[in-house]
Amino acid sequence: AARLVDIMEARGIVSELDANKKREILIDSTYLEKLYAKNKLC
């Protein structure tokens, strides 16, 4: 799972790890829908 999170961080999907708080999701639903359509994941 850690490797997947590292990949998502590298692609700008989630924020960097901060010891004081949880990671934030950096993309919105519109971007996610475009990503799914482009890669035909759904």
Image: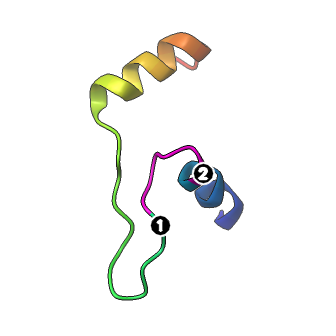
Residue type pointed to by label 1: Glu
Label 1 to label 2: alpha-carbon separation: 9 Å
In this image, 18 relative to 28: left or right? right
Residue at left 34%, top 88%? 20
Q: Residue furthest right?
A: 3
Q: Which coloring applies here?
A: rainbow
Placement of the N terminus among the 4 image quadrants: bottom right
Q: Is residue 31 above or below residue 20?
A: above
| Residue at the spot 49% in from the left edge and 46% down from the top edge | 12
Q: Which residue is mark 2?
A: 10
Going from N to C along the chain, the mark reached first, 1 or 2, is 2
Q: Position of residue 32 (x, y in %)?
A: 40, 28
For residue 16, the mark is: 1
Q: Main secondary structure of the magenta part?
A: loop
Left or right: where does residue 18 sit relative to residue 42?
Answer: left
Q: Amino acid at mark 2?
A: Ala
Q: Which residue is at 29% across, 23% downward?
A: 30
Q: Which residues are magenta?
A: 10-15
Q: Is residue 15 above or below residue 20?
A: above
Q: How many marks?
A: 2
Residue 13, magenta (yes or no) = yes
